[in-house]
Structure formats: structure tokens, C-alpha cells
Image (cartoon, helix red, strand yellow):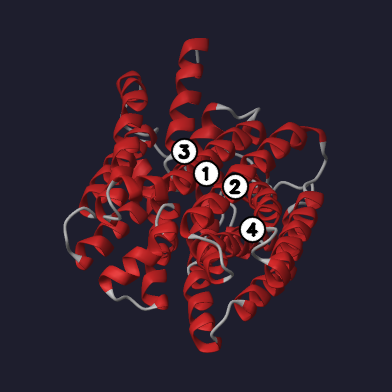
Amino acid sequence: MSRGARTGTVIAVVLLAANLRPAVVAVSPMLTDIRADTGLSSPAAALLTTVPVLCFGLLAPLAPPLARRIGLVPALVAVLCAMTVGGLLRLPDSVVLLFAGTAVFGAAIAAGNVLLPVLVKREFPDRSGTMTGVYSVALSTGAAIAAGTAVPVLLIFGHAWRPALAVWAIPPALALLAWLPLLRNRAAAAPAATAVPRIALRRAPLAWAVTGFMGLQSLVYYATVAWLPEILIASGSGQERAGYVLSVFNLVGIAGSLIFTATVGRTRNQIGYALVSAGLYAAGFAGLLVAAGPLDFLWAALLGLAQGTTISLALALILLRMPDAAHAARMSGMAQGIGYLLAAAGPVLAGVLHDATGGWSWPLLLLGALLVPMAAAGAVAGRDVTLRIPTTIGVRS
């Protein structure tokens, strides 16, 4: 690949990654307005952040076959097109279309989540860890921008939340400009499949550890994104301040991703990242329990460092533990398919606990307890080992 083509690929990866979170993150600062306008209960409103995560889990296994059928780059171009359509569907005055648009967005993001790491493994095989950090930074940046601008955009539209949500159809449409040259310069079809030995991933404990870490860190992240503004509003913060705190949570996540990117190449294993990030999460949740309002930006910063590190680590483990791009695609489908189904329970379960107890203490305690198995899975998956391809053609997972 020429230097110009490599630069173009990096830009395209960054722009697509930056679009993988805003459509979900932008919802939570507007939940108060959405609930007031539609009459949705807390668990029903949480579905607006849970439906995409369910799509991540249910549809992630379909992404690798799609890429094999139409080609990896065309599949990622289709992801951006679907994001644009999903954003526009949320504009009409219809709760049904609101959820339909959210589901379309979720389906698109599901494919992007799975296929973007595969592209990185294929195009940057010797720098996959570093490039994972690069697009993790883009993930956090996109989320931070969405969280920080959601309420100001809502105010621009006079608290009309539908156009404020539909605005997020514009960024993926613009990102297409960076992907169309890649589409023209590459054959649309994927390389023909060859009969090569394959690892039975579902029989590999290491693959399940990667999957468990992906799922648990995603559950904690999406539950936090869904309800952090509501937790802060309940503690006395204003809606706009709560939106800014959520932005800090995502913005500081960039620092976590940058630290991971700068240091991952110097470490033999990734166990320390899993343990430290769990500790940061625990400190942030403890702070929200005892003093949510006065030090809200501090707790958001601790949580942000944790989430930036965990998502970078989860994505890197998919690539670092696999021997090649083909196995990375299958590992990505398994980890994100099963992992995000687990994660989908987070926002709804937190909402149910809140409605049942009338407060946020039990939801925060639950998230804190889940950090223990998350850290354990990360410690197992973080060992310096790579799954080996069998010497004979094996059973598919």
C-alpha cells in the first residue's frame, strides 16, 4: 500500500470510528425531554440506548458473512449509508419510527463494530495494537462531541428533541466522502475462501475470556452512558451541567485510549490494563454513591479514564489473541455478538432497579459488583498468548 493510500485508509477508519457512538450517546442527555413528550417509563426510555446494543449482539455474527459476500470496504460503506438512513428515521413525529431509526442505527453500528477491527488487522498487520488505539481515540472523541453538544443542539431547536437527534445523520453522510475513494480503488469482492485449518473458538477458554471482557465492559459503559445524566440530575445538577459531565466522561476516555495506544507496544501482556481500569471504575462509582453532585466532574473523569482504557483493551484483545485477519473476523463476531447481548441488559436493569428502589444506589452497587468478573476476564484474556491454528482442518465454531 502506498503512503497516500495508507493515509487515506487511516482517515477513513478514524471517521467511521467517530460515528460508532454518537447516535447512542446523544440520547441520554435528552431522555428527560423524550420521556416528558412521549410518556415513556424509565425502562422503556432505556430501550433507546438498549435497542442499539441488542442489535450489536444479535446482528454482529452476520457482519463477517456480509463482508465475504460483498467485500470488506463495500460493507463498511453500507454501514455509513445505513447510519444516515437511521438518523433520518428519527425525525418524524412517531415513537415507532423513533425506535425503528434507532434499530437501523444499531444494525449499522453492529456491522461497523465487527468489521472495522478486521480492516485494521488486514491493512496494518504489524501495528494492529497501535491502530486499535487510534480508532479507540476516535470512538471516544465522537462520543464526547455527541455528549457535549446534545443539550446545546436541543436548545437550538427549542427543546424539539426529534430534529436534535436527526442531526446525527449528517456526520456519517460526510464520512462517506473519505470512504468512496477506497471503494473505487479496491475490488468489491472479498478474496476467494480457501480450505485452511480453523480454530474452534467456542471451545477455546481464551476466546471466552475475550468475549466476557468485551461484554462486561460494554455493559458497564452503556449503563453509565444511559443513566449518568439522570443520576446527576437526581443529585441536584441541572440538565445542561449533566450533559457537560457526560461529555467529560467521554472526553477523558480519549486520554485513556491515548495512554493505552502509547504504552501497549511496550508491554508483554495486558493484564495491568484490566486491573487498573476496574479500579478506576470502582472509584468513580463510589464517588457517585457518596457525593455525586459536588465532585461530579472528578467522578466522570475517573470513569472516563476507565472506559477509554477498557474499550481500547477489548478491541485490541480481539486482534492480539488471533493469528490472522480471518480469525480476527470470527473472534470479533463472537466477542461482540455474545458480549453485546450481555451488555444490553445493563441500561434496562439499572432502570428497573431505579424504579423499584426509588434511587440510584442499587444500580451503582450492581455496576460496582460487575467489575470483579470484568477484571477477572481481562486478566485471563490479557495473557501474552496467541491462539494457534490447528495443523489439520478443524470443526467450525
Nearest to N terminus: mark 3 or mark 1 = 3
Q: Is residue 180 visible?
A: yes
- The reply to whether callout 3 and callout 1 are in contact (CB within 8 Å) is no
Closer to the camera in the image, 92 or 221? 92
Q: Which residue is mark 1?
A: 144
Q: Is residue 381 left or right of residue 48?
A: right
Nearest to N terminus: mark 2 or mark 4 = 4
Amino acid type, label 1: Ala
Horizontal and vertical percent for residue 332?
A: 53, 50
Nearest to N terminus: mark 4 or mark 1 = 1
- The reply to whether callout 4 and callout 3 are in contact (CB within 8 Å) is no
Q: Nearer the viewer, mark 4 or mark 1?
A: 1
Horizontal and vertical percent for residue 134?
A: 59, 33
Which residue is at 52% across, 27% downward? 123
Amino acid type, label 3: Ala
Q: Which mark is residue 248?
A: 2
Which residue is at 33% across, 42% downward? 79
Q: Name above or below for residue 136 compared with residue 352.
A: above
Q: Which mark is residue 18?
A: 3
Which residue is at 16% across, 56% downward? 92
Q: Which residue is mark 4?
A: 207
Horizontal and vertical percent for residue 57?
A: 45, 62
Nearest to N terminus: mark 2 or mark 1 = 1
Closer to the camera in the image, 365 or 202? 365
Q: CA distance from mark 3 to mark 2?
A: 16 Å
Q: Is residue 90 left or right of residue 111?
A: left
SS under mark 1: helix
